């Protein structure tokens, strides 16, 4: 009986070890792809202020600029509760992509 129990424990240990190795290999293949797509990289121009300064299309034409981030206070987008005004965002997009 002892030998049988020992074999059973060894089998379970081997299965667990194989599963652990398999999962580690699978994660090592998946993790770089997920990390590469979920983390922005490059140089981004940031705008801010109250109201934000209007961007120009020349910003994105710079060879070192990968994107543009418009930081805008929510009070500009929703001046009154339940009333939304997206004109500042629309103006920024129109200036960037004429």
Image (cartoon, rainbow, N blue to C red):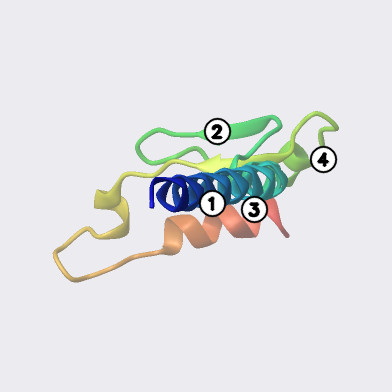
Residue 61's disc is 4
Q: Mark 1 points at which residue?
A: 11
Please state the horizontal and vertical placement of residue 75, each as a whole percent of the image.
Answer: 24, 50
SS type, badge 2 = strand
Q: In screen coordinates, is 77 left or right of 46?
A: left
Tell me which numbered mark, 4 or 2, is placed earlier along the sequence: 2
Q: Is residue 37 above or below residue 91?
A: above
Which of the two discs, 4 and 1, labels the residue nearer the N terminus?
A: 1
Q: Nearer the viewer, residue 14 or 5?
A: 5
Q: How far apart are marks 4 and 1 (CA)?
A: 62 Å
Q: What element carries label 3?
A: helix
Which is in the foreground here, disc 4 or disc 1?
1
Q: Mark 2 points at which residue?
A: 46
Closest to the camera, between mark 3 and mark 1, is 1
Q: How far apart are marks 3 and 1 (CA)?
A: 66 Å
Tag 1, which secondary structure? helix
Q: Can residue 55 be seen in this view?
A: no
């Amino acid at each position: 009986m002892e030998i049988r129990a020992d074999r059973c424990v060894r089998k379970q240990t081997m299965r667990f070890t194989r599963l652990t190795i398999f999962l580690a290999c699978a994660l090592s293949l998946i993790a770089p792809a997920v990390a590469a797509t979920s983390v922005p990289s490059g140089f981004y121009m940031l705008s801010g202020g109250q109201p934000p300064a209007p961007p120009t299309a020349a910003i994105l034409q710079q060879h070192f600029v990968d994107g543009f981030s418009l930081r805008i206070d929510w009070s500009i987008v929703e001046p009154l509760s339940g009333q939304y005004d997206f004109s500042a965002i629309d103006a920024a997009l129109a200036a960037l992509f004429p």
